[in-house]
Image (cartoon, rainbow, N blue to C red):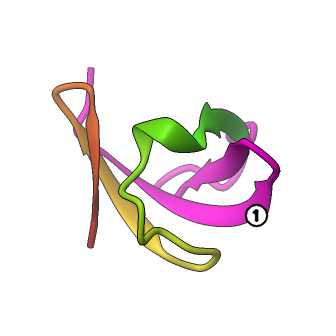
Amino acid sequence: MGPYEYLLVRIDGDYALLQRTDRKDAEILPVARALLPPQAGEGDRLHYENFSYTIV
């Protein structure tokens, strides 16, 4: 699985809504905020690989 690049579109409570940057037709993926880096905010680009997210 991966690596993939995501855009953090919106934070909605305990979830973040992510959109893949390579496929604009992909559905928005809800991800628990606990899985993301604590400083991640709306508009950040995230790299996903080996079951972890990092800010690009």
Give the magenta part as a residue range. 1-28
- Indicate whether 42 appears above or below 13: below
Question: Would you identify the image quadrant in which residue 29 lies?
Answer: top right
Q: Position of residue 24 (x, y in %)?
A: 66, 55
Question: Would you identify the image quadrant in which residue 39 lies?
Answer: bottom left
Residue 27 located within the stretch drawn in magenta: yes
- Indicate whether 49 appears above or below 5: above
Q: Between residue 34 and residue 27, name the one nearer to us.
A: 34
Q: Measuring 26% from the left and 26% from the top, which residue is drawn there?
A: 51
Q: Measuring 60% from the left and 34% from the top, which residue is drawn there?
A: 32
Query: Is residue 49 shown left or right of residue 32?
Result: left
Q: Measuring 75% from the left and 37% from the top, which residue is drawn there?
A: 27
- Indicate whether 9 appears above or below 34: below
Secondary structure beneath dot 1 equals strand
Q: Between residue 41 and residue 22, name the one nearer to us.
A: 41
Query: Is residue 54 shown left or right of residue 19?
Result: left
What residue is disc 1 on? 10
Residue 8 located within the stretch drawn in magenta: yes
Residue lying at the far right of the rendered structure: 12
Q: Position of residue 50 (x, y in %)?
A: 16, 27
Q: Measuring 71% from the left and 49% from the top, which residue is drawn there?
A: 17
Residue lying at the far bottom of the rendered structure: 43
Q: Position of residue 40 (x, y in %)?
A: 47, 68
